Amino acid sequence: MAEGGAAELETQRADTAALMKTPLKKGDTWYLVDSRWFKQWKKYVGFDSWDKYQMGDQNVYPGPIDNSGLLKDGDSQALKEHLIDELDYILVPTEGWNKLVSWYGLTESQEPIARKVVEQGMFVKHCKVEVYLTELKLCENGNMNSVITRRFSKADIIDTIEKEMRKLFSILDEKEIRLWNKYMSNTFEPLNKPDSTIQDAGLYQGQVLVIEQKNEDGTWPRGPSTNNVKNSNYCIPPYSGYNSYDYLEPGRHSEQAGLCGLSNLGNTCFMNSAVQCLSNTPPLTEYFLSDEYVDELNHDNLLGMKGEIANAYADLIKQMWSGKYSYVTPRAFKTQVGRFAPQFSGYQQQDSQELLAFLLDGLHEDLNRIRKKPYIQLKDAEGRPDEVVAKEAWENHRKRNDSIIVDIFHGLFKSTLVCPECAKISVTFDPFCYLTLPLPLKKERTLEVFLVGNDPLTKPMQYKIVVPKIGIISDLCEALSSLSHVPADKMVVTDIYNHRFHRIFSVDENLSSIMERDDIFVFEVTGSRTEDTDMVVIPVYLREKYRQPSYGHHSNTCLFGQPFMISVPRSITEEKLYNLLLMKMCRYVRTCNENEDEEGSLHFVKDLGINGNGQNGVHEEGSPSEMETDEQDDESSQDQELPSENENSQSEESVGGDNEDSENGIGTDDPCKGQLCHGQKKQLFTFQFNNLGNPDINYVKDDRQIRFEESRQIRLDERTYLALDWDPEVKKRWFDDNAAE
């Protein structure tokens, strides 16, 4: 173990630093080291010039290399998912690893985490350490339910897998076998190119591989190759008689040419649909079936793919149009596409149009008849006829691009630009290969809304209305008006959520702001919402007000029930406002009758210490007793703190003088002092204005008269509302929750 002096530690630091600069080379082996252990080692040897103060300190001695932080529990080789280079682990070359192990050793029961360097990229090659291996499931032909999982590098060849399977299933080397790639319940593909890598063979994570042993009588359990195989891209002995695309069950009959399906390899329907479209383009298919493409392959085109995409596509088309198969498996074609367009590798869902665009462009460049593209000087139209300009543009395009794809798919766009300053007109014709057109959209949508009428005894009615998809709120009002016969200008559209108005819509807002899950309530109001200046529309919330003993005189509120809209005159007495509110809720609020005994009356104001802070419990806007914030948008409303009776508010004596009258919120100058007047019985609730930033809802309270300023209509805002505060006992007795719902 490395516990030497400073000289030895300096040697470790220098040797390791030099080895860490080793360039990646295909086929080399590198090792993973847990970054936590490596950082501790760097401190111990003073690896960084600015961190040498603990160099040689036994308190930071790293001990044996410990990679447990990188591994899944119970597996000495399975890495945790989503590990990041240099953050979770450090990559060390073989020589550097051997030195570290000789100095510090490896934690008992752990194995080295070795990984190969693989080469990636088709045109620009770059090397990369393959940290995560490909996990394959191995089984025997006679027992496919029993699989053994092993991990391989993408650089490993098929022969390596075969040797591992012979070892796992105790198959002698002289025993003749066949390897199959099982990718559907009854579909198999032979793997008969031993020197092909896992990456080239198109094997993916979780792929099931089957090993088949030849019978003693010389037959194969899966049947002879001539009957059983029709899809393999790897055609060397002993399977030279296999065709190149699919495995066919025994007894499958030949089909009509071109009437051929494509197997789904796993989310490859995007590719299959594009191939089927091109396959059923007669001029293109005839071109490949007649082998005309062979003489036009362009292997030297830097923009092409050395003819490989064209060859792979030609092989697939020939199989589909051979008339021998009802379906083929385009695995070899999929592999080639993935090599040149990595975004289509793997088995994730992809866009069919993107694949089609790549394929058309790839076939064009692989089959471009122009070997050396000339430089073309573009000319402006300069008033020449369109026919002349278009012909010139097409000829210029053909001088650089000439292939079967151009013959069939390319065309010209006419583009006209007018200079806004000098009015010069520029006309160009631009080549295109395909058109991207939008799908037709439905112009209308259906919404379910509730209409709350002016009649307080009528329950809200649900309507299903059809509105323009790109319409505005006024369109919704017009559609609802045609069904309910309520004038559209007397409607207020709202979104109610969690006992509050989540949104109050203006008539010019877009309908796209209404989601399918929203609860839309439309309220009928008195007078015109936009023109009436004698009435104001006020949102009303219902709140339950209760005291928290631990906070002295402070009380909390939470919302309940459904909020509503009420139209009131610009000048109104507190008593009339209270009665209007009570009448609005008469369907679900039971009122006191004159025969109620005093014991059953509502004594909540004095007994519970809840003061309305004004005659009849009306709070003035901007007064110290006004609530500071509205409730939060939680499922359960947040508690809000109210001032105490005696702090910044009128006392009971100043409001009413007499205790009995004070309980009822009746002032000393009330003509009904000392008795309960008709319509002025024990108050069920107090009310409070909450104005959060809306300058239109200023009001003045003078001699129990409420007067809204300005002659304009109030701008409705979900944060500006009139809150009706109910005592819990009063609510329980007089408020009918079932009727309210």
Image: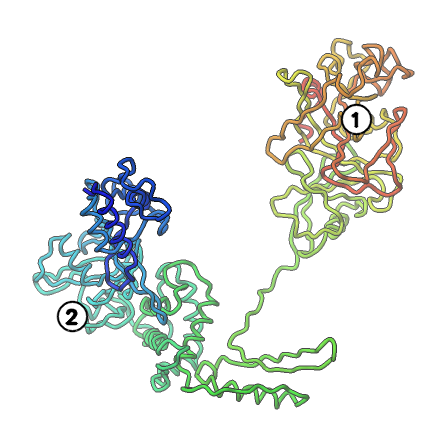
Marks 2 and 1: CB-CB under 8 Å?
A: no
Is residue 730 at least partly visible in the picture?
A: yes
The picture places residue 426, in percent across and down from the top left corner, at 66, 82
Q: Which residue is mark 2?
A: 238
* Disc with the residue nearer the chain's start (2 vs 1): 2
Q: How many marks?
A: 2
Identify which residue is drawn at 62% across, 89% down: 387
Badge 1 element: strand
Residue 400 drawn above or below residue 671: below
Is residue 327 at least partly visible in the picture?
A: no
Q: Amino acid at mark 1?
A: His
Residue 318 drawn above or below residue 354: below
Q: Which residue is mark 1?
A: 619
Q: Nearer the viewer, residue 390 or 456?
A: 390
Q: Nearer the viewer, residue 94 or 404?
A: 94
The picture places residue 647, in percent across and down from the top left corner, at 75, 19
Q: Quadrant of residue 278?
A: bottom left
The picture places residue 630, in percent across and down from the top left corner, at 69, 33
Q: Residues within 10 Å of mark 1 (few under 14, many from 20)?
A: many
Q: Amino acid at mark 2?
A: Pro
Question: Is 29 placed left or right of 345 in the picture?
Answer: left
Badge 2 element: loop
Q: Quadrant of residue 287?
A: bottom left
The picture places residue 201, in percent across and down from the top left corner, at 27, 65
Which of the two marks, 2 or 1, is nearer to us in this view? 1
Question: Is 409 placed left or right of 724 in the picture?
Answer: left
Q: Nearer the viewer, residue 555 or 186?
A: 555
Identify which residue is drawn at 40% across, 86% down: 371
